[in-house]
């Protein structure tokens, strides 16, 4: 579940439709908040600052958390918990993340040799990062999970 972040105001519903991750542009940055649909209220305010709007926002398939990117670093916001934490320190700033179908892992491109990026996977908590292509001489485009 990936949503583009609009240049002004955006709303990204969770897969179970219980929440919306809302973004709002203000001046030089964005606010990222969690809106509780059933209670019709903002449940949590997670972040204020610059966002990488090109890669969007990604909900976990079970709607327990979502990921968003600041510059080239990925942050996680958990439903029902205040604050955010960094899960991936550096990834390609132009390609979005992809959750595995069960939500256990995320896949992303990460530069390894100049402009060449390899495909990496890690848990959605940021642990266990590993390079799954190990081919720094070939450009990878549009990686996808195998079903």
Image (cartoon, grey):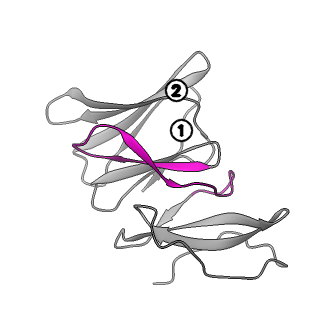
- In the rendered structure, the answer to whether residue 25 lies left or right of residue 35 reads right
Q: Residue at x 59, y 29 (%)?
A: 7
Relative placement, left or right, of 65 versus 48 is left
Considering depth in this image, is 120 or 96 the residue closer to the camera? 120
Q: Nearer the viewer, residue 147 or 132?
A: 132
Looking at the figure, which quarter contains the C terminus? Answer: bottom left
Mark closer to the observer (2, 1) = 2
For the residue pair 89 and 62, the one nearer the viewer reads as 89
* Residue where numbered disc 1 is placed: 5
Residue drawn 68% across the image and 64% down it: 110
x then y, percent, for residue 80: 21, 43
Decide which of tag 2 and tag 1 comes sooner along the chain: 1
Q: Is residue 125 left or right of residue 54?
A: left
Q: Residues within 10 Å of mark 2 (few under 14, many from 20)?
A: many
Residue 32, horizontal then vertical, whole percent = 42, 32
Does residue 135 show up magenta in the picture?
Answer: no
Residue 95: assigned label: none
Circle 2 SS class: strand
Q: Residue at x 15, y 36 (%)?
A: 38
Q: Are marks 2 and 1 in contact (CB under 8 Å)?
A: yes
Give coordinates of residue 96: x percent, y percent: 59, 56
Magenta residue span: 73-96
Task: Say left or right for 5 vs 114.
Answer: left
Q: CA distance from mark 2 to mark 1?
A: 10 Å
Residue at image location 26% in from the left, 42% down from the top: 19
Vertically, is 40 above or below 137? above
Look at mark 2 in the image and give the residue it sits on: 30
Q: Is residue 5 above or below residue 127?
A: above
- Looking at the rendered image, the quarter that the N terminus falls into is bottom left
Q: Quadrant of residue 138?
A: bottom right
Q: Residue furthest left?
A: 39
Label 1: state its secondary structure.
loop
């Amino acid at each position: 579940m990936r949503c583009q972040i609009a240049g002004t105001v955006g709303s990204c519903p969770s897969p179970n439709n219980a929440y919306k991750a809302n973004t709002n542009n203000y001046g030089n940055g964005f606010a990222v908040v969690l809106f509780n649909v059933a209670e019709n209220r903002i449940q949590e305010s997670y972040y204020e600052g610059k966002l990488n709007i090109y890669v969007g926002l990604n909900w976990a398939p079970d709607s327990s958390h979502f990921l968003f990117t600041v510059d080239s670093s990925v942050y996680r916001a958990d439903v029902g918990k205040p604050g955010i934490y960094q899960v991936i320190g550096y990834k390609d700033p132009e390609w979005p993340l992809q959750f595995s179908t069960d939500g256990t892992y995320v896949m992303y491109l990460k530069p390894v040799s100049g402009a060449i990026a390899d495909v990496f996977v890690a848990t959605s908590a940021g642990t266990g990062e590993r390079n799954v292509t190990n081919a720094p001489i070939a450009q990878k485009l549009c990686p996808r999970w195998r079903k």
